[in-house]
Image (tube, rainbow, N blue to C red):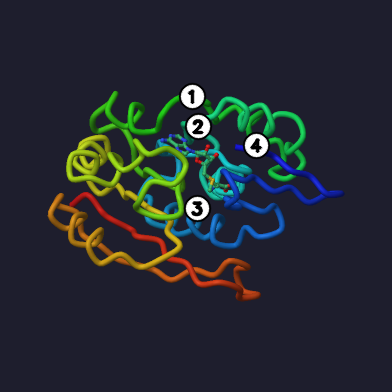
Amino acid sequence: MKLLRRGSEFSIRVANTELMNSRIYGSEDALAELSCERMADRDGRLLIGGLGMGYTLAGVLSRVGPKASVVVAELVPAVVAWNRNEMAELNGAALEDPRVTVREANVLDVIRAEKNAYDAILLDVDNGPSALVSKTNDRIYSPTGLAASYAALRRGGTLAVWSADHDPAFTRRLKQAGFEVEARNVRARGRAGGSRYLVWLAKRS
Ligand SMILES: C[S@@+](CC[C@H](N)C(=O)[O-])C[C@H]1O[C@@H](n2cnc3c(N)ncnc32)[C@H](O)[C@@H]1O
């Protein structure tokens, strides 16, 4: 993974694929908005995986209450360091917010560590429900990975998954895991439009 900078613009690349560009964050914010509006308790507990440029985290922090607790799981320690230093200006130094706890860890391990623990789990770790950053990420989207997310959520909690594409097989797996599933279209540049992406909102019933 590489961080590139041109003036005030940042790009994170994995091999030759651009994972994120700092100028485009409408869908990362939509992931936060759609997840937070489903929370019964604005002072609840959320898990975000991964950190990226911190836009989803900043979006969550602007919408939850002062007593909320946000765990961020990020696989790549350099990404955490970039957010504390070079990229802090992008997300309002979100990692310094006292409601935030950062875990330099695989989000699946964090999911598996607790049961009935979260009101929302927000996943934006790949380009969708198939591995990109790390081959082992496929486990997150597998039936056992989804069962772990189901168990980690509190009743009524939401698993929200960002994706570049539709994936009917993943929708089926979510339903088979027991979730009530909704898929929402989101845009790369928010109200200004841009590329079309998708967020699955899977509710633990
Ligand atoms: C597309 S970026 C996330 C963008 C983020 N939503 C934002 O607002 O900037 C994907 C991030 O997930 C991280 N990641 C990938 N696999 C992971 C895993 N298994 N556990 C935790 N973080 C992971 C990557 O290192 C990268 O920082």
Q: Are marks 1 and 2 in contact (CB under 8 Å)?
A: yes
Residue type at mark 4 is Ala
> Residue beneath label 2, please?
74
Q: Position of residue 172 (x, y in %)?
A: 18, 61
- 44 above or below 18? above
Q: Residue at x 23, y 29 (%)?
A: 115
Q: Considering depth in this image, is 123 or 155 the residue closer to the camera?
A: 123
Label disc, if present, on residue 40 of the rendered structure: none
Rate crowding at label 2 as few (under 14), some (14 to 19) or many (20 or more) other CA atoms within 10 Å: many
> Residue beneath label 1, please?
103
Say if disc 2 is inside 8 Å of ligand 1.
Answer: yes
Q: Position of residue 38 (x, y in %)?
A: 37, 56
Q: Secondary structure at mark 3?
A: helix
Give the Cα separation between the discs numbered 4 and 1. 14 Å
Label disc, if present, on residue 94 of the rendered structure: 4
Q: Earlier in the sequence, mark 1 or mark 2?
A: 2
Residue type at mark 3 is Ala
> Residue beneath label 3, please?
32
Give the Cα separation between the discs numbered 3 and 2. 17 Å
Residue type at mark 2 is Glu
